[in-house]
Amino acid sequence: MNFRPPEIWLVSGPDREQRHALARRIGVAVEHAAHVDGEALWDQLVEGRADPQVDEAEADRQYELAIRNQCLLARSYAEAGFTPVLDFPVATPYHLEAYQNYLIGARLRLVQVSPPADLAGMGITVTIDEPVDAILARAEDTLVRRA
């Protein structure tokens, strides 16, 4: 029996609507896909969500909690035979490392719209209106490799 690590796509960018639309377009183009919206998970913190301007450490902990829960859902969908397509802003190398750690054993593919400078060169950078077939044609370039 051949084991093939699950493919998990991560769409990052500052604009929620654009990122969400791109993730949905990628999901539609991939057979048996599930879209996991990180901001929907982040929004589940309805009381006690930390303000990064007031308590940066707690805000970072809560942000990573959303990433961890997103990755748990991604693993669950992957185990059921679906290709997870995640969307959430990956604002720092630390956030990307969190995805890599929570998704060990998976083939993490990163597609970025307007990436922060310290994440440039990771995965691929696209425009919001880039055709999905052009993105999928560059799939090998989207793979995130550990340093």
Image: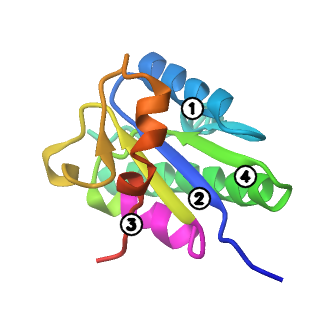
In this rendering, position of residue 121 left or right of residue 78? left
Label 1 sits on a secondary structure element that is helix
Q: Which residue is mark 3?
A: 97
Q: Earlier in the sequence, mark 1 or mark 4?
A: 1
Q: Residues within 10 Å of mark 1 (few under 14, many from 20)?
A: many
Camera-nearest residue between 101 and 28: 28
Q: How far separated are the C-alphas under marks 1 and 2?
A: 22 Å
Q: Which residue is mark 4?
A: 73
Q: Earlier in the sequence, mark 2 or mark 3?
A: 2
The residue drawn where x is 45% and y is 26% is 19
- The amino acid type of the residue labelled 4 equals Leu
The residue drawn where x is 28% and y is 53% is 92
Q: How far separated are the C-alphas under marks 2 and 3?
A: 11 Å
Depth check, mark 2 against mark 3: the one in front is: 3
Segment colored magenta: 96-106
Q: Is residue 14 visible?
A: yes
The residue drawn where x is 77% and y is 48% is 82
Q: Is residue 35 above or below residue 25?
A: below
Q: Earlier in the sequence, mark 4 or mark 2?
A: 2
Q: Is residue 21 magenta?
A: no
Q: Which residue is mark 1?
A: 26
Q: Position of residue 30 (x, y in %)?
A: 66, 38
Q: Position of residue 70 (x, y in %)?
A: 62, 50
Q: Quadrant of the C terminus?
A: bottom left
